[in-house]
Image (spheres, rainbow, N blue to C red):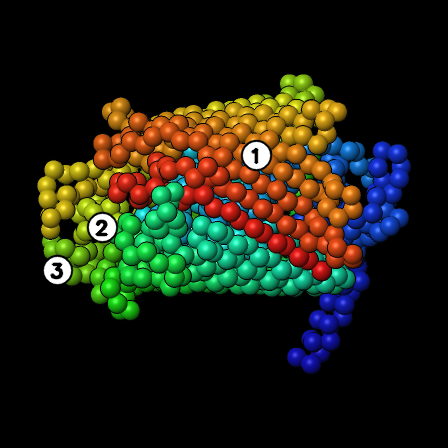
Amino acid sequence: MKKIIPILLLGFSAMLHAQNSVSGTVTDAQNKPLKGVTITAPEIHKGTTTDENGKYTLNNLPNGNLKLSFSFIGFAIQNKTIFLEQKETTLDISLEEKAFQMDEVIVSTAFNKLQSQNVMKVEHASMKSLQQKGTATLIEGLATIPGVSQVSTGTSIGKPVIRGLSGNRVLVYSQGVRIENQQFGDEHGLGLNDAGVESVEVIKGPASLLYGSDALGGVLYFNPEKFADAHTFKANFSQKLFSNTLGSNTSLGLKTSTDNWKFSARGSYNTHSDYEIPDGDRITNTRFNESDFKTGIGFSNAKFSSVFRYNFNKLDLGIPENGVAEQTTTKKTDYPKQGVFNHLLSWNTIVYLKKSKLDIDLGYIDNDRSEFEDSNVAVLHMKLRTFNYDAKFHLPKFGKVESILGVQGMHQTNTNSGEEYLIPDATTNDFGVFGTFNYEWKSNVIQAGLRYDNRKINTSAFGISGEEGSFDAINKSYDSFNAALGYKTKWQENLTFRLNLASGFRAPNLAELTSNGVHEGTNRYEIGNASLKTEQNIQTDVNLEYNTDHFEFFVNGFYNHINHYIYAAPAGTVLDGNEVFDYIQNNAMLFGGEIGFHIHPHPLDWLHLESSFENVTGKKENGDYLPLIPANNWNNTIRTEFNIKKWLTDGFATLNVTHTFNQDQVSGFETKSNDYTLVNLGFGGKVHIGKTAFDINLNGNNLFNKTYIAHLSRLKTDGIPNIGRTIVFGLNFTI
């Protein structure tokens, strides 16, 4: 043993010294050096910035192909892929001034291509841009992305909707791990905070090829905050204040890096009173409190990159049941309420071989949820523990063909300890294996793949069979084969066309299989169906984009056919004073799309005009409409950019007018909703006082205090309006 240790140390030391490096100079079109250009290697979580001479260096880089991104405000992002093989490489870059052309590396797709190279159209939004809209929660910001909506319960609980599909039909990833937080419940939100999140990517459509069950409707993929550049230390403080809810969102982050090691930590606290509606009343018990902590540590060298992250999220959520009742501005939640504790641990490791690599993600989630009716004794107490694994082997490139083989799985347990059971104790095991390839020639790309999945669900019997709250034991196994085929081409230099055909699946969840009792959130008695089949869909997506220096246009269309769509339907009987609903299946279809443009007229370089329209229609095979289909939405924004001498830079002012149309295409037990128009204003920029600089933003949302009820609000049936006018002030300070 004593001989082995020195050998290992020598091997590790040799590994550290067999490093690659990239250096160079970044200039503008006039060959003038650019200071402060950000250079990142996202795959290995490494970055730096250019000095006053435009020079940069990245050390300790792995062998093989490495993607580098060069970004600077006012210039088009440049992305380069270079091949490294234990040597010093020189890479000089010339950046071109561009108004808004962005080309981000998309992490949520198989081959991590640039958006311009990607076969699938993926929406990408930075968390900074979403936060500048003055929303109180993460899901509120997401709902501003075309094709994304939310099912909300007040201001505290929101569930994402992608093109009319929600709940377990939308998969959420954070830190490279699928989030499991009891999505089957109508009042079970994401359990994620926007602090410490860099950006979000939205896949609209089935993504089962990469993600397995539950990615039937799409994927929300949250990218964590980047580590600091090598040999730097950064501290960040942010504060947001909300007038309507008398709310506050405070965040403090620290991060530092060496050539090999990286560390970050961020804590935040979010607290709000009951929200106020336009007539001046507050909706009782919509208050909430949220604590969040994120930390990460990483190491990388020429052989491998490894990052470990941890996220703790604590939620104290009031549940509104009485509408306009007790009027108070307290932030202490009343009964009924929820208490939720989420622990998320993730470990990503990439092993670099000579011409290939192995990418491994491991994740563990502990979701602890308690629901209290009228005392501190939990009526419902459920613990969901989930272990995930995901391994992808990137084979050596063969000519112009890239290929990946992968294996994926999950082990999950649900346990109850409260007075009542909503679902039984259960164990779920997933296993999937897939292969995919990418072939590029000239301006064309073809991507295809196949996948097999198996899900096994075992539940325990509880109570007396046939009585309310009892569950029979079940032992189910679900199999599914899925495929995806995509094609991208450029018809002209500025005109891109994408066509994708993909299948997806979703195994029935525990609530659909086993429910036997009154669902308080919907005031109905729900009875599960252990004979439910797997939902299976096929979706066709078409995307057309036109991009120039001063004009962008896009149109997206989709058709989604779902076999064995699961939904609750009235049985025509009454139990315990509540109408009985059974879970049944029917074939369904959803279709629609998004269209929009962005104009940056020259020579008015300070002006941006943006507009987008989104539509989705959902029907069962018998012609009835599906529930929870968002209303058509038309979003318009005028944005100006400016500098005021030397004390305000990167300044902006926005006027946003959003019109939501009436929704009368509703299911048999839904209520219709009226149209409404909301006007929002925004202002912000970087303020310089001496050598100190900080970002500010000021937002006025629902500026004219419009009374409206969103179609997907769960308070709609009680006639409770959404939030009235709110002013949001934000401050962000980094040293």
- Tag 2 residue: 519
User: Disc 3 or 2, which lies upstream in sequence?
Assistant: 3
Which amino acid does the dot numbered 3 rest on? Ile
**Distance CA(mark 1)–CA(mark 2):** 42 Å
Give the residue at x 68% y 33%: 100
Dividing the picture into quadrants, the one containing residue 351 is bottom right
Question: Residue 488 location in percent, x, y?
Answer: 60, 26
Which amino acid does the dot numbered 1 rest on? Leu
Q: Residues within 10 Å of mark 2 (few under 14, many from 20)?
A: some
**Distance CA(mark 3)–CA(mark 2):** 19 Å
Give the residue at x 69% y 76%: 5
In the rendered structure, find residue 655 and report the number of the disc placed on it.
1
Q: Is residue 68 visible?
A: no
Answer with left or right where residue 615 lies relative to residue 31: left
Are the residues tagged 3 and 1 within 8 Å (C-beta)?
no
Which amino acid does the dot numbered 2 rest on? His
Give the residue at x 75% y 37%: 75
Answer with left or right where residue 374 lies relative to residue 234: left
Q: Nearest to the eye among marks 3 and 2: give it.
A: 2
Question: Residue 181 location in percent, x, y?
Answer: 39, 55
Answer with left or right where residue 523 lies relative to residue 368: left
The local secondary structure at tag 2 comes to strand
Q: Residues within 10 Å of mark 3 (few under 14, many from 20)?
A: few
**Distance CA(mark 3)–CA(mark 1):** 60 Å
Q: Residues within 10 Å of mark 1 (few under 14, many from 20)?
A: some
